């Protein structure tokens, strides 16, 4: 494990919390967009309801069977033409609703799930950072200090104190040996942890391609939706522009 990785690891650990915050808000925005599509679809249904109600009653304002009024109006079918065009508008809203529902389904079941999956990967990496931090705790510095102190004490006792028992020196020497072995074990564990982290972080690098994939899916869905809505709007315009009466 090289210094470059340790630097990358530290920078990633420092950034992960903010990245999770940003991506969580991104997921919320995607969810909000999907809910807006559902609301627009609902409003389209209300448009159809209002248009149909208006068509039913507008002939009371513009009667097409009153001979007296019709005799003054050379365009006696205008209200019928108007209502036919309103029918086209109602169809437009119905078809738009279906397009919105289809788009909402795509966003909710495919694209949004990919956004959430990436968030899960970020949380997993954060958990790895936290787990590694806990497992990397050691007391090597304290052990090294104690070894140094005990070695000084051992050398002093073995050369200056003739009354010290051999068993006491052996016991002190064993303490030094045990501490050195503990340092070795902790260093070995630290090496294993760093290598495991390296492997995990290396695998995590593959998730960057999920970012590209989900935004491409989002972009394609937006293009498809806009094309379908443009086609519906264009067809509506072609159907009513020549038939909708504007004057007598």
Image (spheres, rainbow, N blue to C red):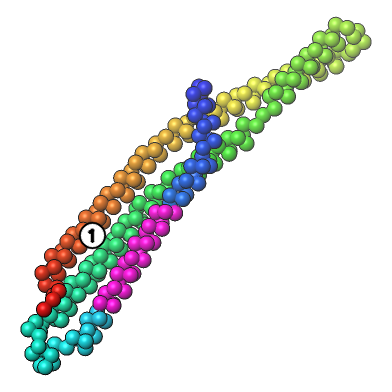
Please identify the residue farthest to the right as the structure is shown: 163
Measuring 54% from the left and 28% from the top, which residue is drawn there? Answer: 194
Q: Residue 244 at what x, y percent from top left?
A: 14, 73
Q: Is residue 7 magenta?
A: no
Q: Which residues are magenta?
A: 28-51
Measuring 54% from the left and 36% from the top, which residue is drawn there? Answer: 14
* 101 left or right of 155 in image: left
Res. 179 image quadrant: top right
Please identify the residue farthest to the top as the structure is shown: 159
Q: Residue 240 at what x, y percent from top left?
A: 14, 69
Residue in the foreground of this view, choosing between 145 and 94: 94
Residue in the foreground of this view, choosing between 196 and 173: 196
Measuring 21% from the left and 71% from the top, which residue is drawn there? Answer: 89
Secondary element under disc 1, as helix, strand or loop, is: helix
Which quarter of the rendered picture does the C terminus lie within?
Answer: bottom left
Q: Is residue 174 something one can see in this rendering?
A: no
Residue that mark 1 sits on: 229
* 148 left or right of 211 in image: right
Q: Is residue 194 above or below residue 145?
A: below
* 34 left or right of 165 in image: left
Q: Residue 8 at what x, y percent from top left?
A: 49, 29
| Label 1 neighbour load within 10 Å: few <14, some 14-19, many 20+ | some
Residue in the foreground of this view, choosing between 193 and 28: 28
Measuring 60% from the left and 27% from the top, which residue is drawn there? Answer: 189
């Amino acid at each position: 494990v090289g210094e470059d990785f340790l630097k990358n690891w530290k920078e990633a650990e420092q950034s992960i919390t903010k990245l999770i915050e940003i991506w969580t808000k991104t997921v919320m925005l995607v969810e909000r967009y999907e809910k807006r599509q559902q609301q627009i679809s609902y409003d389209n249904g209300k448009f159809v309801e209002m248009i149909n109600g208006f068509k039913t009653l507008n002939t009371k304002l513009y009667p097409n069977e009153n001979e007296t009024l019709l005799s003054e109006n050379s365009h006696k079918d205008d209200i019928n033409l108007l209502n036919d065009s309103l029918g086209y508008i109602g169809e437009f809203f119905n078809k738009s609703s279906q397009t919105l529902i289809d788009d909402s389904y795509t966003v909710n079941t495919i694209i949004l799930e990919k956004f959430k999956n990436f968030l899960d990967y970020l949380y997993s990496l954060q958990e790895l950072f936290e787990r590694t931090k806990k497992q990397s705790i050691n007391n090597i510095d304290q052990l090294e200090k104690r070894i140094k102190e005990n070695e000084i004490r051992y050398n002093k006792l073995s050369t200056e104190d003739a009354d010290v028992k051999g068993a006491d020196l052996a016991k002190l020497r064993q303490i030094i040996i045990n501490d050195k072995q503990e340092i070795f074990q902790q260093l070995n564990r630290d090496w294993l942890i760093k290598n495991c982290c390296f492997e995990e972080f290396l695998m995590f690098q593959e998730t960057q391609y999920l970012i590209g994939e989900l935004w491409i899916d989002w972009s394609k869905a937006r293009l498809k939706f806009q094309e379908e809505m443009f086609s519906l709007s264009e067809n509506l315009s072609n159907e009513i522009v020549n038939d909708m009466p504007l004057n007598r």
